[in-house]
């Protein structure tokens, strides 16, 4: 962001799209090319899309909104979020505003290491095989680093070797983990290449047959964490705080509730991951697996009361994202979104995403324990319903307001009310 710029932008949601882009350009210091890219209705050239997937016939546009009020590690940041769900961006803006004066979000990361797995089966002596493979650590390091000399020059590469015995119905499997620092890349292609390169050597050393060789999306050596404090005056008092803590404890204890609780977290996380061209499926798989790491699916967040009575929230989850490689590097809108964020490392991106996940969780829980989830969500969803029945221009806002006032955000009601609007007009 531009020096001394603030993420607190009054009336941002009331601006036209052109006005918002102008504001983002000023606050984030974007160049004209990035702003022009954001203004394109399709914003992905056909030849680029054709090379991104097989059998491409069209592109599917998802709205990109900007979360304001975000202060992360003392820095104000505008956060692009790509999502079709109406209330997601608004929830992050409101949640971040309520902890902004208390310092916003403080974040940390555990590292940038990915894991590749090489599965060895039909091993007669798995315990001895494990030791034999571990004895070859120096050779493993050399073979892995030779796969990507550029990564090594950038300070990354092989870091460690683990070998596990995994019990299965067919017998014990010897599973080798290659621990690799992928720096500012998500790293899937790099670690997969290393695993495939090692496969024949693992067979030779272990005495079995290699089956799978691929990365693990449970990137528990690449955790992102965020915490924030919400003063009682900002959230509506001790009653709201206690109800939110009770809601968290429900999610912590019950997997049926935890699934929906964590889905709310991922509403925010996945929206930033998608906007920056990263792999939403990988991040989601890692997050949900991490939530079950102790053998029971539970909450990705924790909530408690501070000594002064404030509400304190924290989140920790795997965050395998990158700034280079894949769609992040070739999708021009992803590049524009990264320019808005102003992050220059994968770790920096991971920190912001964790903060957004915590903000999203706060917003959902507060709505649930106060007005209910439907009031805010359906109010925003009313615009979608209005468009679905054919409203255009000023009709959209007018019809949405009627639906909200009637508390009937349904297409049949919308169609009838649209007819009445046009008759009166």
Image: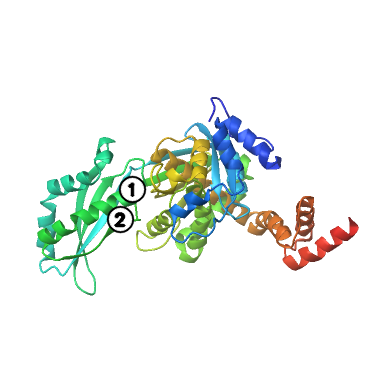
Q: Residue furthest top?
A: 3
Task: Give the Cα distance between marks 1 and 2.
Answer: 9 Å
Q: Quadrant of residue 344?
A: top left
Residue visible at 49% across and 50% down? 47
Q: Compared with residue 333, is residue 292 higher up or lower down, i.e. above or below?
A: below
Foreground of the two, 99 or 238: 99
Q: Position of residue 120 (x, y in %)?
A: 19, 64
Q: Which mark is residue 30?
A: none
Residue visible at 44% across and 41% down? 349
36 with respect to 210 (left or right): right
Q: Position of residue 391 (x, y in %)?
A: 76, 57
Foreground of the two, 364 or 57: 57
413 with respect to 133 (left or right): right
Count the marks: how many? 2
Q: Residue furthest front?
A: 47
Q: Which residue is mark 1?
A: 187
Foreground of the two, 259 or 332: 332
Q: Is residue 67 visible?
A: no
How busy is the neighbourhood of tag 1: few (under 14 within 10 Å), some, or many (20 plus)? many
Give the structural element (helix, strand or loop) at label 1: loop
Q: Is residue 107 visible?
A: yes
Q: Compared with residue 30, is residue 326 higher up or lower down, i.e. above or below?
A: below
324 with respect to 137 (left or right): right
| Mark 1 or mark 2, earlier in chain | 1
Q: Position of residue 203 (x, y in %)?
A: 14, 61
Q: Are marks 1 and 2 in contact (CB under 8 Å)?
A: yes
Q: Which residue is mark 2?
A: 215
How busy is the neighbourhood of tag 2: few (under 14 within 10 Å), some, or many (20 plus)? many
Q: Compared with residue 29, is residue 169 higher up or lower down, i.e. above or below?
A: below
Task: Give the quadrant of the C terminus.
Answer: bottom right
Give the structural element (helix, strand or loop) at label 2: strand
Q: Position of residue 16 (x, y in %)?
A: 70, 41
């Amino acid at each position: 962001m531009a020096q001394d710029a603030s993420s607190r932008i009054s009336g941002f949601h009331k601006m036209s799209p052109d006005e918002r882009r102008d504001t983002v350009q000023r606050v984030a210091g974007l160049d004209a090319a990035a702003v022009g890219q954001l203004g394109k209705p399709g914003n992905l050239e056909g030849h680029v899309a054709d090379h991104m997937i097989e059998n491409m016939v069209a592109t599917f546009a998802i709205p990109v909104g900007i979360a304001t009020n975000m202060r992360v590690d003392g820095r104000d940041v505008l956060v692009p979020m790509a999502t079709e769900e109406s209330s997601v961006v608004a929830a992050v803006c409101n949640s971040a505003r309520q902890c902004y004066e208390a310092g916003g979000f403080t974040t940390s990361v555990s590292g940038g290491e990915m894991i590749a797995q090489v599965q060895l089966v039909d091993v007669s002596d798995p315990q001895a095989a494990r030791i034999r493979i571990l004895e070859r650590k120096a050779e493993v390091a050399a073979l892995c680093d030779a796969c990507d000399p550029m990564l090594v020059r950038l300070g990354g590469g092989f870091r460690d070797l683990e070998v596990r015995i995994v019990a299965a119905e067919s017998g014990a499997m010897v599973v080798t983990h290659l621990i690799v620092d992928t720096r500012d890349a998500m790293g899937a292609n790099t670690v997969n290449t290393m695993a495939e390169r090692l496969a024949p050597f693992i067979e030779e050393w272990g005495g079995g047959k290699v089956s799978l060789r691929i990365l693990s999306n449970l990137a528990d050596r690449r955790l992102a964490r965020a915490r924030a404090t919400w003063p009682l005056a900002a959230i509506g008092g001790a009653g709201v705080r206690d109800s939110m803590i009770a809601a968290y404890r429900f999610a912590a204890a019950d997997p049926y509730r935890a699934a929906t609780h964590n889905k709310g977290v991922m509403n925010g996380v996945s929206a930033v991951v998608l906007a920056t061209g990263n792999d939403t499926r990988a991040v989601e798989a890692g997050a949900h697996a991490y939530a079950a790491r102790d053998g029971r699916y539970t909450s990705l967040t924790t909530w408690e009361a501070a000594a002064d009575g404030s509400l304190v929230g924290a989140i920790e989850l795997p965050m395998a994202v990158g700034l280079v490689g894949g769609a992040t590097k070739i999708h021009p809108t992803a590049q524009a979104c990264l320019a808005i964020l102003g992050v220059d490392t994968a770790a920096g991106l991971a920190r912001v995403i964790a903060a957004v996940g915590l903000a999203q969780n706060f917003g959902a829980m507060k709505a649930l324990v106060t007005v209910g989830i439907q009031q805010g969500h359906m109010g925003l969803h009313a615009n979608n319903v209005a468009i679905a029945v054919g409203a255009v221009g000023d009709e959209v806002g007018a019809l949405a307001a009627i639906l909200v006032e009637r508390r009937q955000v349904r297409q049949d009601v919308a169609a009838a009310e649209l007819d009445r609007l046009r008759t009166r007009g």
